[in-house]
Image (cartoon, rainbow, N blue to C red):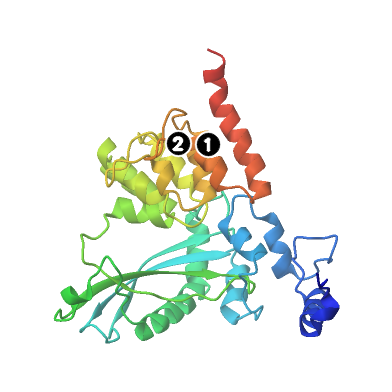
Amino acid sequence: MTKFTLASFPLLASSLLAAVLFAPKLPRSRDIQKVADDGWAEFDSLPACSNLGEDFENGNRGDGKDLPYMAAMRQVGVHRAVFVLSATYPALGTTPKVVTVEHRVYFSQLDGPAGSITDSNALARIRDSGVQAQLDKIAIGLGRQARLYVGVDNPPADLEIARNIPAAATTVFFSNAMVPKPGVVFEPLVRERLTDLESASETGDRARLEAIIHEQHPDRAHLEDALEHSVVSQYDNSAVIRMLVQAGGNVNDLSPKDGLPLLLSVASPCSELALIRMGENPEARSRSGEPLLSLALRLQRGRNRYLITLQGAVAALEAPRAGH
């Protein structure tokens, strides 16, 4: 039998050697590379449950080019900004003539449990510094070039003859050049628009959410809807989930949309962790019958840092049951 070695494949051997010599080093591995760049080092502070940190470690990074708006954001303590946009498309295949910024939400962390900035003085400083106007201009410029996204939920046949199509989009700005630059994708509003409560919950807008809860006193059914929207955020939205629970929401209420537990709709492991810590029903099961807690642990294999935290939360939740 012929014995193959790397010498039998000189091109493969040389490419493997190049891969070893020139492979990018992960910034979190301090044994391999001392992190000198503050833009890279900032990722060290992200919670283990962060999708952003996981993407970064997997190589999904920006080009490292620090743009003027990023420095301006950092100067006023903003590290992430979520902008909600609206537009009207004359017809399918066109670009919008007018794009409007409906809401802005500012965060003091790239991702993490602190939640959005709510202090009125801090928000006034952001507005008066010119950062808000700068980001408005960029978001609107990106929006005016954006085509309308038509997917499975929006059949082209229904839109081909439509005129003046209302659309919405969300774009996210980061102060760190190692995060991919923002983009805008508009989707047609073929269904009912989100309520203010749902929109504030989905974007992590604690200031707006607090005002809505105080002024409108939403009932449990509306809080259930809001909880479902809060867990679809790709970022840590645990602060909003806590606010909704404190207002009367229940993490064990089934989704009004599909009748399934909230844990099955979670987009961020940080929000998943929040639901479990707030008392997710240990008896709850997925549609296939698998206990949700074991499903959560199984789906997060490979994310070792987060898995340790998740195991602790699950064990704490199951401890009272084990004592009976």
Query: Residue at (56%, 78%) from the top-left corner?
Result: 69
68 versus 270 height, above or below: below
Compare residues 81 and 291 and report the one nearer the observer.
291
Q: Amino acid at mark 1?
A: Ser
Q: Quadrant of the N terminus?
A: bottom right
Residue type beneath disc 2:
Glu
Which one is in front, 27 or 182? Answer: 27
Q: Which mark is residue 294?
A: 1
Q: On residue 290, which mark appears?
A: 2
Relative horizontal placement of residue 179, taking residue 234 as reference (left or right): right
Q: Residue at x 60, y 63 (%)?
A: 55
149 with respect to 279 (left or right): left
The location of residue 150, given as percent across then percent down, is 29, 74
Residue 219 visible in image: no
- The image quadrant of residue 245 is top left
Residue at 33% across, 74% down: 186
Disc 2/disc 1 C-alpha distance (Å): 7 Å
Q: Residues within 10 Å of mark 2 (few under 14, many from 20)?
A: few
**Is 191 on the left-hand or right-hand side of 101?**
left
- Name the secondary structure under disc 2: loop
Q: Residues within 10 Å of mark 1 (few under 14, many from 20)?
A: few
| Rendered location of residue 152, percent (x, y) | 29, 67
User: Mark 2 near mark 1, Cβ–Cβ under 8 Å?
Assistant: yes
In the rendered view, would you say 324 is above or below 201? above
Q: Provide the secondary structure element on which disc 1 rests.
A: helix
Q: Residue at position x 60%, y 81% from top?
A: 67
